[in-house]
Image (spheres, helix red, strand yellow):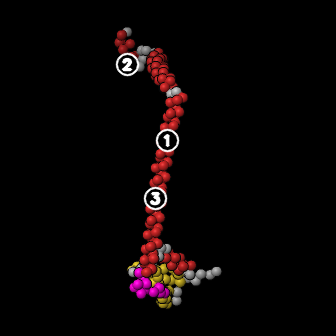
Amino acid sequence: MAEEADFERKMGGGRDSDDDTEVFKSKNLQAERRRREKLSSRLLELRALMTKPTIITDAISYIHELKSRVQELSDQILAMEATINEHEQQMERSEVDVAQDMNNWGIEPEVKVSKIDTNKLWIKILFQKTRGGFTRIIEAMTVLGFVPADMSVTTSKGAVLLTSHVEVYLVEE
């Protein structure tokens, strides 16, 4: 009989598995109850510490922190705006200097166009170096139906030299 009991225990029998589950559940239930009671008591302690005056004091200090952060960010924005304004003024001064530089060297704006083939042209444009000037030239060429095939751009002494082989496609309106 002892051998049969050992065999059944090894094979998973012997004890009623429902009894094991109930014992296991009851251990978990007790541990869970203790955990909830402990958590509940600590929450009560925390609530006791958090009186209205402490909540208001904490809120006031948080508002002061936010105000100081807003002031810091405002100062940073003002500093950035001042830097941008200085940079724009320097750019304007440099554009005036560039125009003067081009005049000092006796460089005059110039446009030359030579026909290569039926719909192919060679273009040479010499113009004053300004912010956005190159972009405006390319936009004008596109509007006129010029498609650049090869392009060379050189800047020197306040001037921009653009040479290009372009194909011309008539724009129909």
Q: Which numbered circle lies on residue 80?
A: 3
Residue occupying the point 49% across, 41% down: 64
Q: Nearer the viewer, residue 21 or 52?
A: 52
- If you read the primary sequence from the N terminus, does the residue marked by circle 3 or circle 2 appear first? 2
Instruction: Name the residue carrying label 2.
Output: 10
Residue kind at label 2, given as amino acid type: Lys
Instruction: Name the residue carrying label 1.
Output: 64
Q: Is residue 144 one of those drawn in magenta?
A: no
- If you read the primary sequence from the N terminus, does the residue marked by circle 1 or circle 3 appear first? 1
Q: Position of residue 3 (x, y in %)?
A: 35, 12
Q: Position of residue 126 (x, y in %)?
A: 45, 84
Q: CA distance from mark 1 to mark 2?
A: 70 Å
| Left or right of 55 in this view: 157 | left
Where does the magenta region start and end?
Answer: 101-111
- Residue found farthest to the right: 173
* Residue 28 in view, yes or no: no
* Residue 172 in view, yes or no: yes
Residue kind at label 3, given as amino acid type: Met
Name above or below for residue 60 compared with residue 84.
above
Which mark lies nearer to you, 1 or 3? 1
Name above or below for residue 169 compared with residue 86.
below
Residue occupying the point 43% across, 69% down: 90
Quadrant in the picture for residue 14:
top left
